Amino acid sequence: MRGRSVLLLAAMLSVAAPASPQFLSFGGYTLVEAREHKVGDGNMAVTPPRPWNRAPRSIFFDLSEVEDWTQNGVYLDGISFVTDLKDKKALIRQYRRDDRQVPVFRSDMTAPEIAAMVESLYRIRGGAVDFRTTSLQPRQFMGYPGFQQDYDHLDGDEVRRRGRVVGAVIGGRLYMAMFDATQMHYFDAGIGDFEAIVRSARLTH
C-alpha cells in the first residue's frame, strides 16, 4: 500500500511491473479499463480517464482496504486507494515483532496527524531518507470535509519523488487516494489522471 507510494514498497519484493497497460498479463497485473471500478474493500468507486494496471494483492501483502495501481511501473508511478480503514488499523500489514511501527489510524485524527502518519509510512517502511510535506490544506473529498497533502521525498535509490494525498475521515473511517511518482516527468505526466480519479470518487454504501 509502501514508501514512495504504498504501492512502491512492494517493488523490492517482486518482478518489475508492466511498462504500460497493454502488458496486463505480466506478473499477475490486470488491466483497469477507463470506466468506474470499486476499489479496496469495495466501499469506494473511482473512474480513471484511461487504462491503468492493478497490482496483485498476493505480491504486496495488502490489506483488504488498500488497492494499488500503476501506469508505467512501480518504480515510476503509482496510485494507492485506502478505503474504509477502521480505527486502530495501520495502512500496511505489520507485526508486533517489528522494531519500528507505522502509527495506526485513529478515528479522531486531525489532518496534520494523518499527514504525520503518511510521513512515518514512508520513513519507516519505504526507506525515505528525506521527506518533506510541502503543502497541507483543506479539501473536499467525496463530498466530505477532508485534506490535501503534497510532499516530496528522496529514497535509498537516490531518486527524488513527489506525491499527493487527498483524503477524509468519514463516519470514523479513513478514505484516501495517494499518487506518487518520480519528480522527473512521471509526476507531471500522471497528476492529471489522479485529479480526474479524485473528482470521480464516490462512496458505494
Image (cartoon, rainbow, N blue to C red):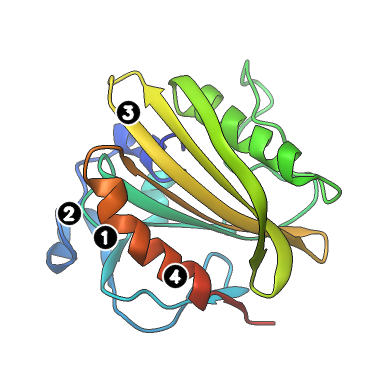
Sort mark 3 into few (<14), some (14-19) or many (20+) by Cα contacts within 10 Å.
some
Distance in Å between CA atoms under marks 1 and 2: 7 Å
Give the mark nearer the N terminus: 3 vs 1: 1
Give the left or right position of residue 40, taking residue 117 as reference: left
For disc 2, the marked residue is 18
| Element carrying mark 4 | helix
3 and 4 marks in contact (CB < 8 Å): no
* Residue at (51% x, 73% y) in the render: 199
| Element carrying mark 2 | loop
3 and 1 marks in contact (CB < 8 Å): no
Q: Amino acid at mark 4?
A: Ile
Give the mark nearer the N terminus: 4 vs 2: 2
Q: Amino acid at mark 2?
A: Pro
Image spot of residue 63 (x, y percent): 56, 52
**Residue in the foreground of this view, choosing between 75 and 154:** 154
Q: Is residue 69 above or below residue 114?
A: below
For disc 3, the marked residue is 160
| Element carrying mark 1 | loop
1 and 2 marks in contact (CB < 8 Å): yes
**Numbered tag placed on residue 136 in the rendering:** none
Viewer-nearest of labels 4 and 1?
Answer: 4
Give the left or right position of residue 89, taking residue 11 as reference: right
For disc 4, the marked residue is 197
Viewer-nearest of labels 3 and 1?
Answer: 3
> For residue 135, which quarter of the picture?
top right
